[in-house]
Amino acid sequence: MDRDIEFIIFGEDWGRHPSSTQHLISIIAQQYPVYWVNSIGLRQPQLQAKDIRRIIEKLMAFMRRAAIADTEISATNLKKIIKPLVWPLARNKTMKYINKKLLSTQLPPKKHYRVLWIALPSAIEYIELCQADLIIYYCGDDFSALTGVDHDKAMQAEQTLSMQADLIYVANRQLMARFPKHKTHYLPHGVDLHLFQSKHECPPAIDKETKNIGFYGSLNNWLDYDLLQQLALARPQLQFYLLGNKECHQVQQLQNENIHLLPAIPHHQLASYLQHWHIAILPFIYNQQIKMCNPLKLREYLAAGCPVISSKYKAATEYSPLVSIATTQKEWLSAIDRITQLTPQQVDEYKQKAYQSVQHDSWQRRIEKIISTIQKIRCSTTE
């Protein structure tokens, strides 16, 4: 195992949701020492129930970090998960000083050529603590459009970070124009081909005797709940399965008997549901966040060979006609009817074409490209 490079990662909370950074870093951690710093938020906490719960959650994680670190490290190959006790986007000089002091006591001493990988712009305040030889900014989202983010502060931090970073990777081609051309690279999301191609038993929650439609992911305000309700009413013979945490009150309007709201499950179990759906859907409303999105599940749907219907946005249209694009209820129903009437032979043909469309998009390939670039830069600076 090559140990001459070490990584410090500033990302979201490890294990909170399967982000692209976690997929990429879990592969890097098989070869190199990786220290993961849990989320430093992108807005000032406020006196509201959700923020108070997160503060308490962070405090509890900090207090018990020693007790649970071993199980997390053994499960992920990470050297350490650092749970920082810092105040997000601090503006007061004293608070900034305290933040840096607290985090400096948790960062590991430098032993090797150190790569600093930043997935959240709020980490800009802590770059100097990390003694980095190479700084990578991985931009997986458009932070100017994400909900729950202080957009002005996030974009200021991102602008500063884009100047300090040696390498910038963007997961959405539309974001490339935002950064310096000479050091910015397009790195689309990957997919775990083995996981979604391997055969899985149908879970008990799925009725194998009826045709069905499925979605997994956060049940948040970017889903079109009116559309989902109307589709379920118009096609009562189909079962709709929605897997994920209920993140907004609109979910409660889905009272249809053929809509099944299932809890979120670990990422490695998703394929068992997906492989037994007749249709997988991406029913997003069209806003700035969705316009710039590039959902991981899109390639996962295709890797599993499940026919896909999606709202219209650039990342989905790039896979048309494998992905059926629908902009009206009539178009959605037409696509649903067409797919549910496919013959077994047509379904097999679709599966083959869908897999071929993503067969070169594994996370492993993405990492090989990144590591090759890092090694070239390292060699050029040490000659």
Image (cartoon, helix red, strand yellow):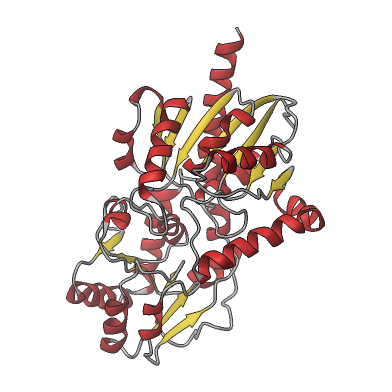
Residue at left offset 55%, top offset 72%: 264
Image-based side of 254 in relation to 34, left or right: left
> Horizontal and vertical percent for residue 310?
30, 64
Residue 105, quarter of the rendered image: top right
Asked if one can make out residue 363 in the rendered structure from this viewpoint, the answer is yes
Residue at left offset 51%, top offset 82%: 206
- In the displayed structure, would residue 279 be above or below residue 155? below
> Horizontal and vertical percent for residue 382?
61, 10
> Horizontal and vertical percent for residue 296?
45, 55
Image-based side of 239 in relation to 197, left or right: left
Q: Nearer the viewer, residue 94 or 332?
A: 94
Q: Nearer the viewer, residue 117 or 74?
A: 117
> Horizontal and vertical percent for residue 128?
59, 28
Q: Nearer the viewer, residue 300 or 67?
A: 67
Rendered-image quadrant of the C terminus: top right
Rendered-image quadrant of the N terminus: top right
